[in-house]
Amino acid sequence: MEYEKSSSIKGKWIVGSDVVSGSKAKLTIETAPTPSQFKNKDGSVKIQDVSKILFDGSNEALNININRVSLDALISAFGKDSKKWVNIPFTVQTEKVLVGGKRQTAVYLIPDGYELKEDTNGYMLITKIGEEDLPTISPDDIDPNDLPF
Protein backbone atom coordinates (compact mmCIF):
# COMPACT_ATOMS: atom_id res chain seq x y z
CA MET A 1 0.00 0.00 0.00
CA GLU A 2 1.30 3.45 -0.90
CA TYR A 3 0.86 6.34 1.51
CA GLU A 4 0.86 10.04 0.87
CA LYS A 5 2.48 12.45 3.27
CA SER A 6 -0.10 14.36 5.30
CA SER A 7 -0.29 18.08 4.69
CA SER A 8 -2.32 18.82 7.78
CA ILE A 9 -2.33 22.33 9.15
CA LYS A 10 -0.75 22.81 12.55
CA GLY A 11 -2.23 24.89 15.34
CA LYS A 12 -5.66 25.78 16.67
CA TRP A 13 -8.55 26.68 14.39
CA ILE A 14 -10.87 29.63 14.79
CA VAL A 15 -14.31 28.78 16.21
CA GLY A 16 -16.85 31.11 14.63
CA SER A 17 -19.16 31.07 17.65
CA ASP A 18 -16.28 32.29 19.85
CA VAL A 19 -15.60 35.34 17.68
CA VAL A 20 -16.96 38.69 18.86
CA SER A 21 -18.58 40.39 15.86
CA GLY A 22 -16.99 43.78 15.25
CA SER A 23 -13.55 42.68 16.47
CA LYS A 24 -10.41 43.93 14.75
CA ALA A 25 -7.90 41.41 13.43
CA LYS A 26 -5.21 40.86 10.81
CA LEU A 27 -3.81 37.95 8.83
CA THR A 28 -0.30 36.95 9.87
CA ILE A 29 0.67 34.71 6.95
CA GLU A 30 -0.07 34.45 3.25
CA THR A 31 -3.34 32.70 2.41
CA ALA A 32 -2.88 29.40 0.57
CA PRO A 33 -5.17 26.82 -1.01
CA THR A 34 -4.98 23.71 1.16
CA PRO A 35 -6.65 20.29 0.90
CA SER A 36 -9.50 19.92 3.39
CA GLN A 37 -10.87 16.87 5.16
CA PHE A 38 -14.02 17.01 3.01
CA LYS A 39 -14.59 15.53 -0.45
CA ASN A 40 -16.51 16.69 -3.52
CA LYS A 41 -19.30 14.51 -4.90
CA ASP A 42 -16.85 13.02 -7.41
CA GLY A 43 -14.58 11.90 -4.54
CA SER A 44 -11.88 14.52 -5.10
CA VAL A 45 -10.60 16.44 -2.09
CA LYS A 46 -12.12 19.87 -1.48
CA ILE A 47 -9.74 22.78 -1.29
CA GLN A 48 -9.95 25.46 1.40
CA ASP A 49 -8.21 28.83 1.53
CA VAL A 50 -6.30 28.88 4.81
CA SER A 51 -4.40 31.61 6.64
CA LYS A 52 -3.70 32.57 10.24
CA ILE A 53 -5.67 35.33 11.93
CA LEU A 54 -4.62 37.34 14.97
CA PHE A 55 -7.28 39.24 16.91
CA ASP A 56 -6.49 42.51 18.69
CA GLY A 57 -5.58 41.72 22.28
CA SER A 58 -4.62 38.11 21.55
CA ASN A 59 -1.14 36.60 21.49
CA GLU A 60 -2.05 33.52 19.46
CA ALA A 61 -2.76 33.43 15.72
CA LEU A 62 -5.44 30.89 14.79
CA ASN A 63 -5.99 29.00 11.55
CA ILE A 64 -8.92 30.29 9.49
CA ASN A 65 -10.63 28.92 6.39
CA ILE A 66 -11.44 32.13 4.53
CA ASN A 67 -14.82 32.00 2.78
CA ARG A 68 -15.31 33.12 -0.82
CA VAL A 69 -17.15 36.32 0.16
CA SER A 70 -14.20 37.42 2.31
CA LEU A 71 -11.66 36.37 -0.35
CA ASP A 72 -13.44 38.50 -2.95
CA ALA A 73 -13.39 41.49 -0.58
CA LEU A 74 -9.68 41.07 0.19
CA ILE A 75 -8.92 40.81 -3.53
CA SER A 76 -11.00 43.92 -4.23
CA ALA A 77 -9.37 45.92 -1.44
CA PHE A 78 -5.74 44.76 -1.62
CA GLY A 79 -5.20 42.92 -4.90
CA LYS A 80 -4.83 39.28 -5.94
CA ASP A 81 -1.51 38.61 -4.17
CA SER A 82 -2.36 37.32 -0.68
CA LYS A 83 1.11 38.35 0.55
CA LYS A 84 -0.24 41.92 0.40
CA TRP A 85 -3.08 41.03 2.80
CA VAL A 86 -0.72 40.25 5.70
CA ASN A 87 -0.67 42.65 8.69
CA ILE A 88 -3.46 44.89 7.33
CA PRO A 89 -6.19 45.38 9.96
CA PHE A 90 -9.82 44.61 9.12
CA THR A 91 -13.08 44.11 10.97
CA VAL A 92 -14.47 40.64 11.61
CA GLN A 93 -18.23 40.20 11.40
CA THR A 94 -20.16 37.03 12.20
CA GLU A 95 -23.53 35.80 10.95
CA LYS A 96 -25.52 32.69 11.82
CA VAL A 97 -26.07 30.57 8.69
CA LEU A 98 -27.56 27.17 7.88
CA VAL A 99 -25.07 24.67 6.50
CA GLY A 100 -26.50 21.28 5.65
CA GLY A 101 -29.40 21.93 8.03
CA LYS A 102 -27.11 22.87 10.93
CA ARG A 103 -26.86 26.43 12.25
CA GLN A 104 -23.24 27.60 12.22
CA THR A 105 -21.43 30.91 12.58
CA ALA A 106 -19.89 32.31 9.40
CA VAL A 107 -16.92 34.65 9.83
CA TYR A 108 -16.47 37.52 7.35
CA LEU A 109 -13.28 39.57 7.00
CA ILE A 110 -14.23 43.15 6.12
CA PRO A 111 -11.55 45.61 4.95
CA ASP A 112 -11.82 49.25 6.08
CA GLY A 113 -14.17 51.15 3.77
CA TYR A 114 -16.22 48.01 3.00
CA GLU A 115 -19.44 46.59 4.44
CA LEU A 116 -21.29 43.28 4.52
CA LYS A 117 -24.56 43.41 2.56
CA GLU A 118 -27.15 41.12 1.10
CA ASP A 119 -27.74 41.29 -2.65
CA THR A 120 -31.18 41.20 -4.30
CA ASN A 121 -31.04 37.39 -4.44
CA GLY A 122 -30.24 37.01 -0.73
CA TYR A 123 -26.51 36.30 -1.14
CA MET A 124 -24.04 37.96 1.22
CA LEU A 125 -21.44 40.27 -0.35
CA ILE A 126 -18.76 42.56 1.00
CA THR A 127 -18.78 45.77 -1.01
CA LYS A 128 -17.28 49.23 -0.83
CA ILE A 129 -19.34 51.49 1.43
CA GLY A 130 -21.76 53.51 -0.67
CA GLU A 131 -21.64 51.13 -3.62
CA GLU A 132 -25.25 51.22 -4.77
CA ASP A 133 -25.40 48.64 -7.54
CA LEU A 134 -24.84 45.32 -5.87
CA PRO A 135 -23.87 42.59 -8.31
CA THR A 136 -26.37 39.80 -8.62
CA ILE A 137 -25.45 36.16 -8.83
CA SER A 138 -27.25 33.83 -11.19
CA PRO A 139 -27.45 30.07 -10.65
CA ASP A 140 -24.94 29.72 -13.51
CA ASP A 141 -22.33 31.47 -11.32
CA ILE A 142 -22.52 28.79 -8.63
CA ASP A 143 -20.23 25.78 -8.75
CA PRO A 144 -22.24 22.78 -7.45
CA ASN A 145 -19.00 21.40 -5.97
CA ASP A 146 -18.92 24.36 -3.56
CA LEU A 147 -22.34 23.52 -2.08
CA PRO A 148 -22.28 21.74 1.29
CA PHE A 149 -25.09 19.37 0.30
Image (cartoon, grey):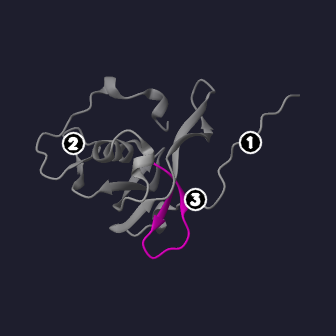
Which residue lies at the image location 16% right of the left edge and 53% below the top edge? 129
Label 2 vs 3, first from the N-terminus? 3
Residue that numbered label 3 is attached to: 13
Q: Which mark is residue 119?
A: 2
Which residue lies at the image location 49% right of the left edge and 46% below the top edge? 31
Label 1: which secondary element: loop
* Whole-number angstrom distance, CA of label 1 to CA of label 2: 39 Å
Label 3 vs 1, first from the N-terminus? 1
Q: Amino acid at mark 3?
A: Trp
Label 2: which secondary element: loop
- Alpha-carbon neighbours of circle 3 within 10 Å: few (<14), some, or many (≥20)? some
Residue that numbered label 1 is attached to: 6
Judge from the rendering whether residue 13 lies leftward or rightward of residue 88; answer left or right: right
The location of residue 108, given as percent across then percent down, is 37, 54
* Whole-number angstrom distance, CA of label 2 to CA of label 3: 30 Å
Which residue lies at the image location 43% right of the left edge and 44% below the top edge? 82
| Residue nearest the viewer, comparing 124 with 50 | 50
Q: Amino acid at mark 2?
A: Asp
Q: Amino acid at mark 1?
A: Ser
Judge from the rendering whether residue 113 lies leftward or rightward of residue 67; answer left or right: left
- As for residue 148 lying within the magenta part, the answer is no
The location of residue 124, given as percent across then percent down, is 29, 46
Which residue lies at the image location 23% right of the left edge and 50% below the top edge? 117
Q: Which mark is residue 74?
A: none
Residue extent of the magenta highlight: 52-66
| Residue nearest the viewer, comparing 30 with 90 | 30
Q: Are marks 2 and 3 in contact (CB under 8 Å)?
A: no
Looking at the rendered image, the disc whose residue lies closer to the viewer, 1 or 2, is 1
Looking at the rendered image, the disc whose residue lies closer to the viewer, 2 or 3, is 3
| Residue nearest the viewer, comparing 31 with 68 | 31
Examine the rendered structure and indicate whether residue 57 appears above or below residue 26. Answer: below
The location of residue 20, given as percent across then percent down, is 40, 70
